[in-house]
Image: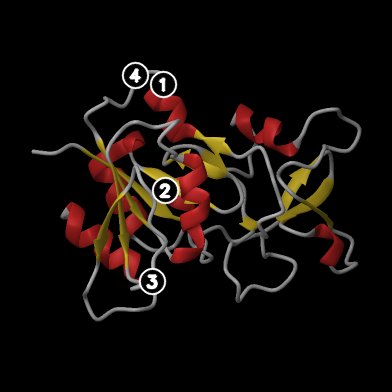
Amino acid sequence: MKKYIPVLCCSKSKTVKSDIFSYNNQHYKFVASPDNAPKNGVLYCTPDDKIPGSGKKWRDLINKQNHKDLTPAFELYKNPVYSSLYEKYGKHFYIFSAGWGIVRSTFKLPYYNITYSAQSNKLGKRTKDMHWNDYNHLLEDIDAGIISSDAVIVLFAGMVYLDHFYEFASASKIKNKKIIFHKSAKIKKIPGFEYKHYDKPISTNWFYSAAREVLKI
């Protein structure tokens, strides 16, 4: 039986009740473009912005995993498929977050409004020129031998994630077999990746159904 390592894209719908992140008695919201934020008493920031009064970035604070406003990634998103994948794969299930990178399912994240979707407003839309120091826990765990070289990486995500995944999992970085499930008939294919078309009559959020079917959860 093949050992799959699933990577599922993140979701806009999140479970936490508040989108506020508190630090030193100040409220913050994580977005893609703080310059487009409203003036409402909240400070807007990207994950790679520096913490006020500190030389460190918000990403450094999140990496410590000890802030009260953090939620394990598999619990952060509303769709139950995330919890189902966690139950079957544990920390060997990864989530591709448009705001933070590829993270382990157990890694704690704050609420954020960041997406690759072209339909998003300017506040939340992350564009290709936003080069952040994203987490790549998938690569870290492969380099550390936590994921074996014969494990098969399987991606379930919309087209907007594709170019970013190519960067995260390029052949020079990750030698494992990598399978990309897709719906588009005009997908950009490059060497080092395999492709499987998901042909079920589902369009919106098809990757949830594909993950359930392929991984039998």
Give above or below for 125 relative to 61. below
Q: Amino acid at mark 4?
A: Gly
Q: Position of residue 213 (x, y in %)?
A: 18, 61
Crowding around mark 1 (Cα neighbors within 10 Å: few <14, some 14 to 19, many 20+) is some
Of marks 1 and 3, which one's residue comes earlier in the chain? 1
On residue 74, the disc is 2
x%, y% of residue 164? 53, 51
In-front residue for pair 55/136: 136
Q: Amino acid at mark 1?
A: Asp
Q: Quadrant of the C terminus?
A: bottom left
Q: Residue at x 55, y 57 (%)?
A: 16
Mark 4–mark 1 CB contact (< 8 Å): yes
Q: CA distance from mark 1 to mark 2?
A: 23 Å
Depth-wise, is mark 4 or mark 2 nearer the camera? Answer: 4
- Say whether residue 66 is left or right of residue 194: right
The residue type indicated by label 3 comes to: Lys
Compute the Cα span from label 4 to label 1.
Answer: 5 Å
Mark 2 to mark 3: distance in Å? 31 Å
Relative to the observer, which residue lies in front, 44 or 145? 145
Relative to residue 157, is residue 110 depicted above or below?
Answer: above
Residue pointed to by mark 4: 145
Front label number (2 vs 3): 3
Element type where label 3 sits in the image? loop
Q: Amino acid at mark 2?
A: Phe
Inter-mark Cα distance, 3 to 4: 35 Å
Colour mapping? secondary structure
Q: Is residue 146 left or right of residue 50?
A: left
Q: Which mark is residue 186?
A: 3
* Element under disc 2: helix
- SS of the residue at dot 1? helix
Per the image, label 4 sits on a secondary structure element best described as loop
